Amino acid sequence: MLRYELRQATPADMQLVQELKFLGLRPYVEKLWGWDSDDQEKRFRASFVPDRQQIICYQNEDVGMLHVEEREDSVFLAGLYVAARHRSKGLGSAVIRDVLVFAERCGKPVRLRVLRPNPARELYERLGFRVSEEFETHFTMEAGVAGRLTRRCS
């Protein structure tokens, strides 16, 4: 099992998080809407809130970003980005499994959205996620506890 650590993001992580997010999403955004660098930059700056994000540290290096939101009825995996050189080595799977364990302890399912062209959907399916809703541009997926009473786990 891969050992990684999470640390709270800070304002100094803005460039790292932007690079991870843009490199992770750009191919799929381009396919759906086209890529407008200025628009994406504005959207990112408006949505970057370090208090809501964690940096994934692996082998003493910052290699990814995790954004999880605990909601009333679910744990929402709002973002998971791993540097390209660390993909397909089990790191993303390890992080997602830990999110699933956390959600199980909370008695809540994990939900996420994935853009239709993004092959990460296959990873999510291997980890037990199933499509719960289909939209023109994306899928909503869910895994874990369903139909049980929920409680806050913070």
Image (cartoon, rainbow, N blue to C red):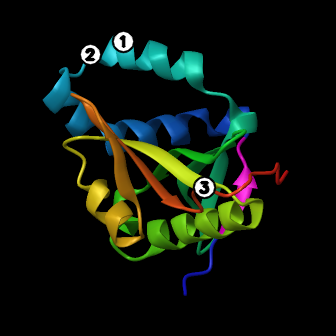
**Does the segment drawn in magenta span residue 6?**
yes
Specify few, some or many for label 1: CA neighbours under 10 Å numbering under 14, 14-19, or 20 or more: few
- Stretch in magenta: 5-9
C-alpha span from label 1 to label 2:
5 Å
Relative to 47, residue 126 above or below: below
The residue carrying mark 1 is: 39
Q: Which of 5 and 72 is in front in this view?
A: 72
- x and y percentages locating residue 24 in the rendered image: 35, 45
> Which residue shows up at 71% across the image and 60% down it?
107
Local crowd size for mark 2, using a 10 Å CA cut-off: few (<14), some (14–19), many (≥20): few
For numbered disc 2, what is the local secondary structure? loop
Point out the image quarter for the N terminus.
bottom right
Residue wearing tag 2: 36
* Residue found 64% across the figure and 52% down from its top: 55
Q: Please state the total of marks drawn on the protein image.
A: 3
Under circle 1, the secondary element is: helix
State the CA–CA distance, disc 3 to disc 2: 41 Å
Q: Which residue is at a point 46% across and 65% down the rendered structure image?
A: 92
Q: Which of 118 and 37 is in front in this view?
A: 118
Q: What residue type is labelled 2?
A: Asp
Query: Which residue occupies the extreme bottom position in the image?
Result: 1
